[in-house]
Structure formats: structure tokens, C-alpha cells
Image (cartoon, coloured by chain):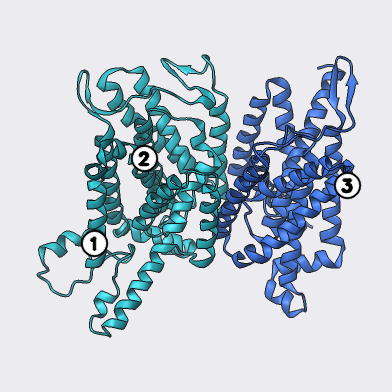
Chain colours: A cyan, B blue
Amino acid sequence: MEGVRMSSEPNSSLLERVRSPFEGPNTLGNSNGFWLTFGVGVVSLALYPVLFGTYAAGERAVFLVYALLGVSLCFVWGFCGILSFGQVAFFGVSGYTFGIVGLNVSSYTGVTLGIVAGIAVATLFAAALGYFMFYGGVRDVYVTIITLVVALVLKTFMDQTAGGEWAIGEAELGGFNGMRNIPNLAIGVGDVGIDVSRAMHYYVALAALIAVYLGLRVLVNGRFGYAMVATREDETRTEMFGYNTTLIKFVTFTLGGALAGLSGVLYVTWGNYIDPQQFAITAASMPVIWASIGGRDSIAGTMAAAIVLQWIELQLTGEWALVIVGSLLVFVILAMPEGIAPRLRTFVLDRQSSSEPATAPATTEEVTD
Amino acid sequence: MNGYELLNVTFQFLESFAFIVLATVGLAVIFGMMGIINLAHGEFILVGAYATTLSAHQGLPLPVAMLVGVVATTIFGIVLERTIIRRLYGRLLDSMVATFGISLVLVQLTRILFGNSIDQVSTPFGAISYGSYSYSLYRVLLAGAAIATLLVLYILFTRTAFGIRARATIQDEETARSMGVDTDRMYMSTFAIGSALAGLTGALYAPARASPTPEFGSEFLVDAFVAVVVGGPSVLVGTPLAGGFLGLIEAFFTFQWTQFIGTVAMLVAAIVMIRLLPDGFSGLVESVRTSWRESE
């Protein structure tokens, strides 16, 4: 990432060289403080199964899986300005595909094939929809409405697939009852392979989340990321500069679909089950809620918001949970339209600049989120 | 296709047309005039339906109960506009997210207050019989209500001083204000009209569909959004054209096969239309008009 981090010393330390691809103006947290907080967060998530037991970790793995879904939206919305309600469509399509392959092809081969097929089908679906929309001149809010409609159409369709005639080989789609007995996550060929369940599944989800997070940081701070952010800020001007904004949006949307597909595979292998409720409007909006509350241009903020909000919902198992989540959403949009993470960053930045006046202008520019 | 079957398709068309138009008008007015995507639109319809049904249970005659439904939704809309929506003008995507939050709260509050469903008001007027078929008269009459609603809106926005002020506000807020239009009040009134229309939809469909549940409103949402997109930004032109086109397709496929195939055909047609006409029907009408004027 040439010239992203304007390092004044030519012989920068090893740590700085390792860090440099992950940092840049397109991500909020670039300071030592941020990475320290991030490290503490990762370590405490990694220690969760040790502290609370493998059963609890297996149950909570879904938080990480949904956080990944939130990240897929944060990427397309926060960095390219495409508000998609359709992330759940790719998530669900991938889940159903994994189920169909996993139930039909037994042994480890089926599961491995299912992972590939699930993500591939979700990616292709996103690419087809993205091609249709962006090359068809559909923009802004119409993109949002079309993605929402696609999710709702899938819900309507899957709801009526109950009964034996809606089976693909061994796999019954199951209508509103959902698809059952989907195999666990595993990797291998034939009878040789590794099973991934419970705490292992938790760690796989955590590893996927961190890998996607770091990968996206490299991507958004690279040349493509600059083009994405430029497209978000002013599409016409970016096009005048010679960028193919249609292609940029198409690629971003497809990549977002692939990430949602990955989280879909992790979801069905977690619960061994998927139903059309995953396409419903409440489910479709959850990623939007996480990204709005966490901060749509902060990937770490979205992840944190997704995990914390799911935890809150779990604590409020009563009937008032949705009322509180909905009110919180309205409150955040009115009080901090850009989300909590950017607000937190400004707060820390203000504190630092008042405590150490004008000594280190380079560091005050990059503080934690 | 014999005469009775033709009549069947016609009734089916009128019912689809009425449903699409009535589901859409409130959303379309608020979106087309104010640039607010109201994801709580379904819950405005819900308020109208519940207010109607509950006041009918209190012994009010149905037309009065429906009026109560419309008034309740209007007041509800004004309160929401003054407290929340007012702060979101010009922030299209934020308005979507915030109204979604409102919708979550409303659905859940309805469930907490009234349970999972309330008793339905019976459908008035009975049925028309012809040959071996019969069709609910009320459902057919709803098409008349839809057309009447569109006519009233047309007169309101093109023939009255209020309509001219409202459209001036939408077109150029600053100029309108400097000409002495109270734009803040115009926004509030437009939102109130949109809410009243959603309330009317709820009131009219409260006796015509299954027992109202907290999800009552979301059944209208897909049709409403599809028709808004297919109709395009100009409400008065777009909504009836979208309703007519989509209704025709839904009625034909429902008649030939099943309700499910009809719904799928309608949605596929809508997606194809969006691909061909990104600005919807009203964009098409606009460009035809422009080229017509140029050739003169």
C-alpha cells in the first residue's frame, strides 16, 4: 500500500512494516491504543470457551457467525455506499445449498463440497443480482428496495416448499418447518477428515471473523479501497477521474455476497438447521441495525455492535427485547447518526489532544475507534 | 375461456389492482413527495386496521369505525413526524433505518398489548353469484375505493392551493419558503396525508382479510415497495400504472395456475420492469412527453 502510511523514517521498525498494510485513512483505528484494544478483545473472545466451558462456547458461536454477516454489510454499505438488505438472501441461499449438498453426498467429501458449493452459489447469486442492478442503471435507494424484495421473495418461496415434492435428492426443503439434520462442519475427503463442532466450531468462526477483518482492512486501505470510498463519496466525480464505478460497485457487492455466504455456511453447520425465517424482514434488518449502531464505516465497530446486541437480546429474553432494540436503533440514528464507534473515536481524540497539546500531531490523527 | 371465467379474471384483476394501489399510495406519497422511505409503512396500516377493528368491537357501525381508524393513524403519523421523522429529512438511508426501528417497536408493542391476533370484523355486503362461481362484493368494491382515492389525491395535489404549495416545497424548498410558504408545515401535512392513506388501507382491509395479527401490515409491504419502484418517482402517474400492470399479471397467472404462481409472476415482472425502466413508469411517461413536446 504505497504511501498510505506516511512514515517519515526510512528504516521503520519491523512492527510498523507488519502493521502498514492494515492501516490507512479508510479505517478508523490505526493507533497503538486501537490495536491494543483489538488484541484484548480477540484474546477475551478466544478465552471464552476456557472460562465458560465448551458447551457455552458452542452455543455462543452464532454471535460470531452473525458478526461476520454484519461485517459483510459494513463492507458494501460503509465503504461503497450500497445499503443492501439482501445480505441475508446470500446467507440463506448459501445455507440451503450447503444443506442440499451435505445431505446428498455423505462422508467428509459432501461436507467439504458443501462449503465450496454454498459460498460459490451465494457469490454467483450476488454477482447475478449485482450485474442486473448496477449494469441496469439501478441506484441508491432502489438498490436497497430491490435487495429487500429479493429477500422477501425468497422467504415467500421457501415458505411453501413443505412436503415431499420439494426435495432435492435426500434433502427436503421443508417449507416453513425448515431444513433439518444438516451435517456439522468438517474438512476432509471420503472417510478421512476432521470434525468441527461445539468449541471447535466457535474457534473456526472466530478465526474466520478475524481473518475477514484483517483481509478487509488490507483491501479498503489499498487502491481498490480508495476507489470504493471515492465511489461512495461522489460517484459522478469518481467516474470523471476515469474509474469504472459500475464495476467497482459490482465487485464490492459480489464480494459482500461471498462473505455473507461464508457466514451462511457457518450458521447452518452451527445449528444443523435453517428455515425461511432467515429471509424475513426482521432477519434482513439485523445486519443493518448492527452496522448503524456500531458505525457503518467501522468494521470493528460493526462486529462489536453485533456481538453486544445479540448478547443484550439474549439477556432480555422477554417480550420487551425487540421494543428495546428498536428504540435503541431510533435513538442512535437521531443522536449519533454515524454510529457509536466514530463517536467514541472523536471522544478519545478530544481527550488526547487536550491532555497533550500539540506535541504529537501525527498520533492525534490516528486514534482508536 | 367462457363468460363466467372472464368475469372471474376481471374480478381477480380488480382485487389485485385495488390491493396494490391501496398498499402503495401512502408509501408513495411520503416517498415521492418527501424522500422518506417509510419502512414502518406496514405498521401505519396496522394501526388503521386495529383502530377500525377494535372500535367496531365497541359497537360502532363499520363506516364510523373506519373513520376512527383513519383519524387514529393520521394523529399517530403527525406525532411521529414531529418527534422523529422531522429530524431525518434529506437523510434517505438514515430515515429507512430509523423507521425500521419504529416498525420493530410497533409490531412488538401491538403483540404485548393485544396478543397474537384479534377477532376479525365480518366482511360486509356478502357475495355476487354467477354460474357456479361467487365472489365477495366487498373485495370488488375496493377497486372503486382505490380509484376514488387516486382521484381525490389528483385533485388535492393539482387543483388546490395546498397542493401547489406542497409541490413547490418538494421541488425547491428554499424558493418556496422565500415566497411565503411555511415549508415545515407542508412537510407535516404531507406526512399526515401519507399516514391517513395508510390508515385508510388498514381500515378498508380490516374486514377483508384474515384476523388482524401484529404482522398484518407486513403483508402489504412487498406489493407496496414493488409498486413504488415500478411506478417511479411521480406518485400520481406511477401508482395507477404500476397497479394496473402488476395487477393484470398477477390476476392472469393466478387464474391460469395458483395464487403462488401469480405472486411469483408479478415479482418477476416487476424485476424485469426495473431492469428495462430504472425510473419506472412515470419516468417512461415523462420521456414520452418530452419527446412529444420536442417533435411539436
Spot occupied by residue A147 in the image (x, y as percentages of width and height)? 53, 44
> As rendered, which of B1 and B91 lies closer to the eye?
B91
User: Which residue is denoted by mark 1 in the rendering?
Assistant: A35
Can you say which quadrant of the picture contains the C terminus of chain A?
bottom left
Against A15, is B262 above or below? Answer: above
> Could you tell me which secondary element the residue under label 2 belongs to?
helix
* Local crowd size for mark 3, using a 10 Å CA cut-off: few (<14), some (14–19), many (≥20): few
**Secondary structure of residue under mark 1:** helix
Residue A195 vs residue A141: left or right? left
Image quarter hosting the N terminus of chain A:
bottom left
Q: Is residue B288 visible?
A: no
Label 3 is placed on what type of residue? Val
Name the amino acid type tagged 1.
Trp
> Which is more foreground, mark 1 or mark 3?
3
Residues at marks 1 and 3, common chain? Answer: no
Residue A280, picture quadrant: top right
Task: Residue type at mark 2: give it.
Answer: Val
